[in-house]
Image: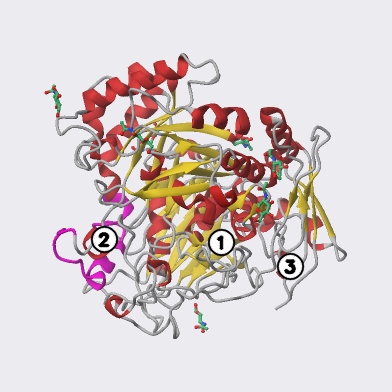
Amino acid sequence: MVVPTLLFLCFSALAQASVTVYHQQPIGQSPAAAPTGSNSVSAPSASYTGVQAYNPRTLSPPPLPQELPPTQFNINLQPTADQVNGLSIQQSGAFFGFSIETSVVTQVLGINSTFIQVPFLNLVQLVVERAGRFHIRIGGNTQETARLTSFIADGKMIEKQGIDPNNPTATPALVYTMEMFYVLSNISALTNVKWFLGIPFNDTANFALEIAQYGEQILGNNLLGLQVANEPDLYARHSHRPQNYTQYDFFGEFGDLIKAMQANTNIPTTNNLVGPNIAVADWTPEMVWDTGFIPAYAPNLFALSVENYPDDNCAETFPDAGLGPIKDPQAEFVKYLYHDAPNAGKTMIQKFLNTAGLAQQAGKPLWMFETNSASCGGFAGISNSFGATLWAIDHGLQMAYSNFSGAMLHIGGQDVSYNPATPPPTGQSTFNQWTPGSIFYSILAVSEAFGTSNQSQIIDITQNTYQPIYAIYDKGNLARVAVTNFLDDPSGANDFTMSIGVGGQALGQANAVPAAVKVKYMRAPSVSELFNITWAGQTLGGMFQCDGRMKGTETIETIPCDQNANVCNIKVPAPGFALVFMSDTALTDSEPSATVTFSTTALTRTMNTATIDAAALETSNGQSGITRHLGSTSKGSSGAGRGTGVVSSVAALGALLAGVVVFFRAFAQ
Ligand SMILES: *[C@@H]1O[C@H](CO)[C@@H](O)[C@H](O)[C@H]1NC(C)=O
Ligand SMILES: *[C@@H]1O[C@H](CO)[C@@H](O)[C@H](O)[C@H]1NC(C)=O
Ligand SMILES: *[C@@H]1O[C@H](CO)[C@@H](O)[C@H](O)[C@H]1NC(C)=O
Ligand SMILES: *[C@@H]1O[C@H](CO)[C@@H](O)[C@H](O)[C@H]1NC(C)=O
Ligand SMILES: *[C@@H]1O[C@H](CO)[C@@H](O)[C@H](O)[C@H]1NC(C)=O
Ligand SMILES: *[C@@H]1O[C@H](CO)[C@@H](O)[C@H](O)[C@H]1NC(C)=O
Ligand SMILES: *[C@@H]1O[C@H](CO)[C@@H](O)[C@H](O)[C@H]1NC(C)=O
């Protein structure tokens, strides 16, 4: 296939320097680690010796439940938010972001500020087009001992220093150079990424504050917050603190950090902290709140945060660590595949509902700073399956309904199976193609469910556990209905029909539903599927086939409603997900007519997200089968200048928000 040549230019009257982003041609080379054979062939994990990100293990879909839900049911929705009790706080389409382990930043983002991963930019841009922006947290276990250094041999930006034997998640201490900040800054100049960085917390007598200093100086407004401590409730267990370390000690250290930051004249902003980031393993959130954490530190907090996974696969990942019997992934699978399942978002976040209320009272957002299907790398066959796509959609929507303000899906590198997207292994062509993760599709679905207004409110109106339903109100009006069918039945006998009526009356009352609704479907042949996943007919492709762009023609279905009977009948495949747009006008109004009219090499549109309606879905990639995307095989100019620090970053951001973005492109068909 011919790879399109295109440039991404961001013009800013304020930008002083021109930036060139170079990339190599994707050459389609398969890494040595690639498993042989088709990914549709079931392979027991024991026979697979490559890295987890490419484990082809394919499970069987769990059998249908004994008691099946009805294949048709009615839901009656109120047309406006003021008639609905229990709606969430206002949510944004940027609800889901990435959490990137510091040690894999080079692989995922790029090797330096002039060598940024184009598939990564394209993937991020897919979300930015739908949500207006994208959040990335750089951190994790590796943030704790990360130290700035002036130089690393071979021009490297980040280098691991060996494995910390005390840490069961086996993450290395690392050093990084200033180049890391320039990479982040240049990414934000190219697409609207907002960052969270982690302050090392291993040494509270002598805080390493460079990440705060240079993060603030170089990223400016593109740095949203600074994470303080990573999973401090596990410090004692991992021997990072004495065994008698408690939440009260942590409370004291958090205060020490604030004092150290305030005493450092190079750190202008000290009210952007994110904490306490507990894993909720050895402490409950309430144990931390009982210390007085919220009132004591509210003036310095950007957000409250927690980290949590519903399950772990530590026994399989660390077979010699004596962690008990290896969990059978086939038996685990069903635990993700219904709304009230043990590993479903709803079950997992019960322990945070009180905290979500406290956060609202304190006027602070609550973020899930790191989550995914299972810690210790996930379960190959589950974490990378279409089942996980549906699980993560339900998890995200449930967190939003429960008044979280954002959640970061973790990217852990080559050794995990849950990545939303996996870059090619190092040692291969740096810009070899990527492997899409099934949960990247969940990010797209959730971003579209909320859109760009920042005013979406969601409510869980699930009637049966296999088919969760959420209604979303945007700017006060019923806007979308998100419905999942977890059942897996290729015969079609368990496809179901959701009959939507509007007005709170019985179906049969005239004229409350629109004449027609638009629907986007998420489809795959089964919950076990790893790659053949489509969102509105488009896919990211298979293993090593993803350049970050959606392939295929976007298909948005128009489903006529019966206005006399006040009903829209929406069929939902088993398995599958449907996003129903209740307001046709909003969708039509936001269609970027300019997108489809350029037949030469230029496409112009504004990136002023304030004017793009929440239902701006057809601004997404693939309009009329023509894919819009960020630069790839050629070079581009981003307008961000090195060394000009804050000024330049802010100027570039301004250009993205208010200015004009020009894409030059050729088409690959
Ligand atoms: C980035 O890496 C490329 C490839 O190794 C190199 O040519 C370029 O000079 C580097 N840029 C910077 C700013 O270090
Ligand atoms: C913290 O991490 C740094 C960098 O790895 C290391 O040099 C230092 O000794 C550590 N400090 C403590 C108290 O563990
Ligand atoms: C906690 O343990 C450390 C050493 O392991 C000791 O020095 C310290 O006094 C203990 N603190 C308390 C409050 O017991
Ligand atoms: C979320 O917050 C809203 C507004 O305070 C509240 O009405 C609603 O009950 C909360 N949702 C949950 C699940 O607690
Ligand atoms: C992909 O899945 C769809 C159903 O979602 C199916 O119709 C199609 O045949 C599958 N393609 C391949 C190559 O398996
Ligand atoms: C949504 O919120 C973000 C972050 O505060 C802001 O940058 C953006 O302009 C807002 N969008 C709208 C449409 O208000
Ligand atoms: C982006 O990268 C280029 C190339 O290294 C560099 O000249 C420029 O200063 C970088 N921009 C920022 C804001 O760091």
Viewer-side label of 2, 3: 2
Residue labelled 1 has its Cβ within 8 Å of some atom of ligand 5: no
Q: In the image shown, does 602 or 498 lie closer to the viewer?
A: 602
* Location of mark 3 (residue): 626
Q: Secondary structure at mark 1?
A: loop
Vertical placement of residue 531 versus 516, above or below: below
Mark 1 surroundings within 10 Å by alpha-carbon count, few (fewer than 14), some (14 through 19), many (20 or more):
some
User: Residue furthest toward the front?
Assistant: 153
- 601 lies above or below 87: below
Alpha carbon distance from label 1 to label 3: 38 Å
Q: Is mark 2 within 8 Å of ligand 5?
A: no
Q: Position of residue 125 (x, y in %)?
A: 63, 53
Q: Which one is closest to the eye, mark 1 or mark 3?
A: 3
In the rendered structure, find residue 564 and report the number of the disc placed on it: 1
The tag earlier along the polypeptide, 1 or 2, is 2
CB-based contact (under 8 Å), mark 1 and mark 3: no
Comparing labels 1 and 2, the label whose residue is closer to the camera: 2
Asked whether the viewer can see residue 79, the reply is: no
Choose top left, top right, bottom left or bottom right for residue 35.
bottom left
Q: Report whether 294 appears left or right of 216.
A: left
Q: Residue 88, position in %: x, y? A: 42, 39
Q: Residue at x 43, y 49 (%)?
A: 160
Measured along the vertical axis of the image, is residue 575 above or below residue 10? below
Q: Position of residue 519 (x, y in %)?
A: 56, 63
Nearer to me, 74 or 451: 451
Quick one: label 2 or label 3, which is nearer the N terminus? 2
Badge 3: few (under 14), some or many (20 or more) residues near its Cα, within 10 Å? some
Residue that mark 2 sits on: 313
The magenta-colored residue range is 321-347
Of the pair 649 and 592, the residue shown nearer to us: 649
Picture residue at 32% right of the left edge, 70% below the top: 70
Q: Distance between the Cα atoms at labels 2 and 3?
A: 41 Å
